[in-house]
Image (cartoon, helix red, strand yellow):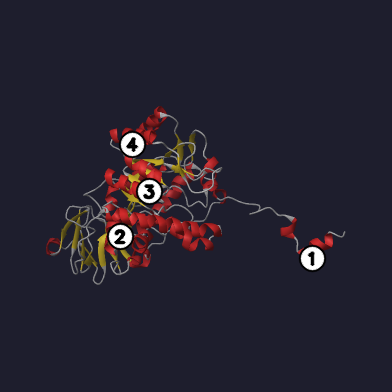
Amino acid sequence: MASILIHGGTVVDGTGAAARPGEDVLVRDGRIAALGAEAAAGADEATERVDATGKTVMPGLIDAHTHLTFGEPTGNDELFNHRTEAYSSMLSAYNARKVLRAGVTSVLDADCLWNIGCELRDAIDAGIVEGPRMRAGGQALMTMLGGTAGRMIKDEGTTGYATVVTGRDVMVNEIRRQIKYGVDWIKIMVTGLIPSMKGPEIKVWNIDELRTVCDTAHELNTKVVAHCRNSDSTRDAARAGVDLIYHASYLDDEAIEAVVEAGASMCPTFTLLGNLADYGARIGTAPELLDVFRAEIEVTAKQLTKAHAAGVRFLTGSETGFAVTPVGEWHARELEMFVDYMGMSPMEAIVAATRNGAFAMRMEGEVGTLETGRVGDVLVVDGDPLRDVRVLQDKEKIVEVIKGGKRTDLVTPIPEHKQRASDQVRFLAACPLTRSLALTEEQLERMSHV
């Protein structure tokens, strides 16, 4: 593998250390071989050179919450009932390139349709598909009440990205099955929306069930991530031994204490909610939901700021893979939201998206920082993310992406993706066509006299 010398840039190494202007970085055999004067001295005539003068050199971003196998559905009906396994596999491979071009060199894809996540990970590792380094889960574990799809989830078995587990034996067997077929993480949907109950998601697992999952997975050297959208779920997930908590919506001080005591990590995934709150009106989101989404961010962020101050490790995640978070578009927005809503400095947000993300990849000490011996995942950014972290969202400013010591082609266009008609939900009407809706008051009055 050729060596690459990135010279003249300002290095932000992902450790939280101060930026270092004019420092060279040498990548050889897929790893960071040297920095500074030693990097320049270690280059030879065969070394490729990347001029980073006036630019920022930093680790590749790590997105710890993605759904690359979902195909950007507009809703659960489309996701569960309008996807085939073979086509979804090909679409996932197509989309993977977009992630890498957005500056994301590693992702955790914790639950998937069929077992495509593990297969996509392996295809990328084998060089068959171009994409980010992946760690993957299988179907998320649910009770029949779990998740956001309500009664669309079957009472047992698998529906889309979810498998309903009932009783300890079924839970244990499903975890073992998933590990047999290659998962890196087990995911639990700890909260769910119940159609007959108004309001936000409620906790639908008890703590003994959660402990069964965590104990079984940990005995087989597999970590557990949990979807938690209320305070009780975050508290019990931490106490049961969950390693990584998604969302942590509306958590209270007791939940924070449980997370701190357990040493769990957190990935709030504000991006999907932020996109809905800020831009939902442009894509047809119900108007009454916009303020609900923004309130969830604000209330949750205030408490998560306390957790951050208490030393909890935070990772960034975008929940890329839905129509509201299409692949390759919003991966870096979470850094902006950490700064705006949690009061993090841009440097703290960068650490969350690089060094801390190595935890999701189960590669701590291997990826996420520009240090000698680390995997050579490097970005060159035409701008200063320490001044304005939003620059990382501008793909035109991502001028070099190096993954494992290999430069990514950012120039050749990716072929246009046309939506397959059978993948979309078609509606005859968005609401009932009543007479009062169809006819004017004058027409109704006239017809009443006929």
Dot placed on the residue nearer the N-terminal end, 3 or 2: 3
The one nearer the camera, 302 or 415, is 302
Mark 1 secondary-structure assignment? helix
Q: Picture coordinates of residue 415 (x, y %)?
A: 45, 58
Numbered marks: total: 4
156 lies above or below 446: above
Q: Picture coordinates of residue 227 (x, y %)?
A: 40, 45
- Please tell me how crowded label 4 is: few (under 14), some (14-19), or many (20+) other residues with Cα within 10 Å: many
Q: Amino acid at mark 1?
A: Glu
Q: Amino acid at mark 4?
A: Cys
Query: What is the quadrant of residue 327 in the picture?
Result: bottom left
The answer to whether residue 2 shows anywhere in this view is: yes
Q: Picture coordinates of residue 375 (x, y %)?
A: 23, 52
Check whether the beta carbons of the residues at disc 1 and disc 2 lie within 8 A of each other: no
- The Cα–Cα distance between marks 1 and 4, rounded to whole angstroms, is 66 Å
| Image mark for residue 349 | 2
Residue linked to disc 1: 442
Residue linked to disc 4: 214
Q: Amino acid at mark 3?
A: Tyr
- The Cα–Cα distance between marks 3 and 2, rounded to whole angstroms, is 17 Å
Picture residue at 52% right of the left edge, 50% below the top: 75
Q: Picture coordinates of residue 412 (x, y %)?
A: 38, 62
Mark 4 secondary-structure assignment? helix
Dot placed on the residue nearer the N-terminal end, 4 or 2: 4
Dot placed on the residue nearer the N-terminal end, 1 or 4: 4
Residue linked to disc 3: 246
Residue reaching furthest top?
A: 169
The answer to whether residue 284 shows anywhere in this view is: no
- Please tell me how crowded label 2 is: few (under 14), some (14-19), or many (20+) other residues with Cα within 10 Å: many
- The Cα–Cα distance between marks 1 and 2, rounded to whole angstroms, is 60 Å
65 lies above or below 36: above
Mark 2 secondary-structure assignment? helix
